[in-house]
Image: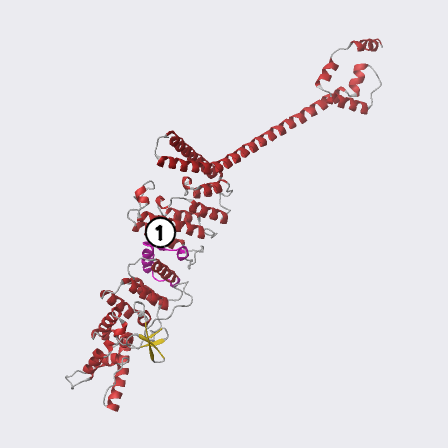
Amino acid sequence: MKMTGSVMQVCRAISHWWWMACTSIFTSGQVEFTPKNVVMLYCAADYLDMTDDYGEDNLLSRAESFFHKHILRQWKDCILALQNCEPVIPRADKLQIISRCLNALSVMVCTDRSLFGWPMMMYGRMQSPGGSILWNGINTGARIDTSESDWWFEDISCLCIELFEKLIQTMAAKGIRPRNLTRAIMYYCKKYLPGLDRRQGGQTGVSTKVVSFSTAPAAIDEGALLQRVVKFLPEKKGKSFCRFLLGLLRVALILGINHTYQDLLEKKIGIQLELATLDGIIIPSYSDSDTLYNTDCVERMIHHFVHSEPSVTSISPISLDLETSPSSERLKRVGKLVDNYIAEVASDVNLKPGKVRSLAEALPESSRSLHDGLYRALDIYFKAHPWLLEKEREQMCTIIDFQKLSIDACAHASQNKRLPLRVILQILFFEQLQLRTSLAGCLHALDAESAPAASATATNEITDQIAQRGGWVTVIHENQVLKVDMARMRSRVGELEEEFSKIKEEMKKVKKSHSYHSSPRFVTGGLGCKLLPRSSDAQSGLVESSVATPRALVEQAQPSTSHAPHRHSLSSF
C-alpha cells in the first residue's frame, strides 16, 4: 500500500520524536518536556494510543498536562509550539493543539504585555517582568510605551503561511482591530516577497520583536504565498495599503501567477484608485510586449474604479451639487492621475494611438474640469511620434474638449506647430466664443447699476477676466493680421511674376517685328537705294525705337512739314 508524501512526513516526524521519547524513558525513567518537543510527543502518544487505560500517568496525559500548564501561558512557548506543528498539522488539528495556541496568542495580543512577565528584548535592552527597562541588570524605572501595536509582527512572521492565515482569522474573530491585522499581513509579505516595496531599501526603524527565534519557516514558494495572501486580504482602504496592493500586483506579474488572482488584486486597487500615486501605477511590461509599460493593467483598474461608483454615469458637469460631492472629488483625482500617467507613458515610441485614446476615454467627461492634462499628454505623444499622419493627429485631438482649455493652454496650443491646422482654428474659434460670452456678461452687469454690492463685485471679477483675456486675444489677432498680410504679399508677388512674363513675351514680339522692318531687303525695296545701313546702326535704331516712349512713337507717326521737301526730292530722284 502506497503512502502519500505528507503521511510519510508525519510518520517520519513521529517516529523521530518517539525514538527520543523512548530513549529518555529508558535512560532516565522519565520524559523531559520542552516547548520544542511537547507537540511531537503529544502527537506520537496519540498516534500510539498511549492513554491511561494501558498505564497510570501515561505519556498522552502527561504531554497534555504540560501543554496546558506551561505552553499556553507563555507567548514565546506558544510561538515555538506552533512552529513545531508544521510537520504534523493534521494530527495537531485533531488534538486542538493549533486552535488552543492561536486562541492563547490572540488573547495575549489584546492584553498588556507587562502582565505576562516575558523576558522581552526591545530597543536592545532587557526588561523586567514589570515592564521597566533593565540596564546591566539594574532596574532603571523607565517604562516602555505599551501603546505600540506592532510588537508581535516579527514573531508571528516566523510561522508558515497556513498557520499565519489561521492566526489572522482567529485574531479577527477575537476583535483585534483590522488596521493592526492589515499591518501584520503587510509585514509578513514584505519579509518573504523581496522587491515588494521599492522604497523600503534598508530597514531604518528599530526592531520591536519580543523574542528572537533561531528557527524560521522553510523555503517558501513565493507564488503560492502570494496566491494565499490575496485570498484573505481584508477589504481596507488607505494610501499605504493601496501602495502595498500595487506592490503585490507588480510581484504577481513578475512571478506570472494565475490571472484569477491578478484580477482580484486589480479589482481591490481599482475601488481605491484615487489613493494611488503615479509611481505606483507605472508598472513595467514583464511580458514579450513591444511597449515599455503595462497599460492594459492600468486600463482594467480604471474600469474597476468606474464600475465601483454607481453614480458615475449620472454625474453632470453643470451640476453644482454633484461637483462638490465626494464621488466627484474622487473622479477628479483619478482623472488627474490618469492624465499624468498618459503623459508619462506617451514617450514610449511603441505606444499605439488607440491605446492612448482608450486610456483617456475610460473615464467619464465629468472627471475633468479642465483638459490641460490631456493636452499636455497629447503634446508629449506628438513630439515622441513625429511620423504620425495629419489625419491621425486630428483623430487623436478629438478626445480634447477645447472649451475646457485654460488661457495658458490655449495660448500654447495656438502656437504649437505639432497640432493640425484645423485644430488650431478650432481653438481660436472657441476662444472668440468665450470672449463674446464674457463681453455679454460684462455689458449685462454694467446695465444693472442698481444691483447690490455682490453684483458689483461679480462685475469687477468679469472685467478682470476680460482684461486678462484681452492681452492674449490681441496677440492672436496680431498673428492673424500677419498671416493675412503674408498671404496677400504672396498673391501680389505671383501677380507681378505673371505680368513680368507677359512683358517678356511682348518684348520678344516687338523685337521680331522691328528686325523685319529694318532688314536690308525691306530698305532697298522701299527706298530704291542700293546702299544699306550698317548692322550696328540698324540695331541702335531698333533699340532706340523699342525704348522710345509711346508719346515719341505717336509724334514720329504724325506727318511733319519739315520733311515734305525731302520726300519730294526722293521721289524725283
272 magenta-colored: yes
Q: Specify the quadrant that holds the C terminus.
A: top right
Q: Which quadrant of the figure has residue 459?
A: top left
Res. 3 in view: no
Q: Which quadrant of the figure has residue 530?
A: top right
Q: Specify the quadrant that holds the N terminus.
A: bottom left
Is 538 on the left or on the right of 366, as rendered?
Answer: right
Q: Residue at x 32, y 52 (%)?
A: 304
Q: Is residue 119 above or below residue 476?
A: below
350 magenta-colored: no
Q: Residue at x 72, y 23 (%)?
A: 512
Q: Which residues are magenta?
A: 254-281
Q: Position of residue 53 (x, y in %)?
A: 14, 84
Q: Is residue 532 above or below residue 568?
A: below
Q: Position of residue 489 (x, y in %)?
A: 58, 31
Q: Secondary structure at mark 1?
A: helix
Q: Is residue 432 above or below residue 113?
A: above
Which residue bears the numbered disc 1?
302
Colour scheme of the rendered structure: secondary structure
Magenta stretch secondary structure, dominant: helix
Q: Which quadrant of the figure has residue 517?
A: top right
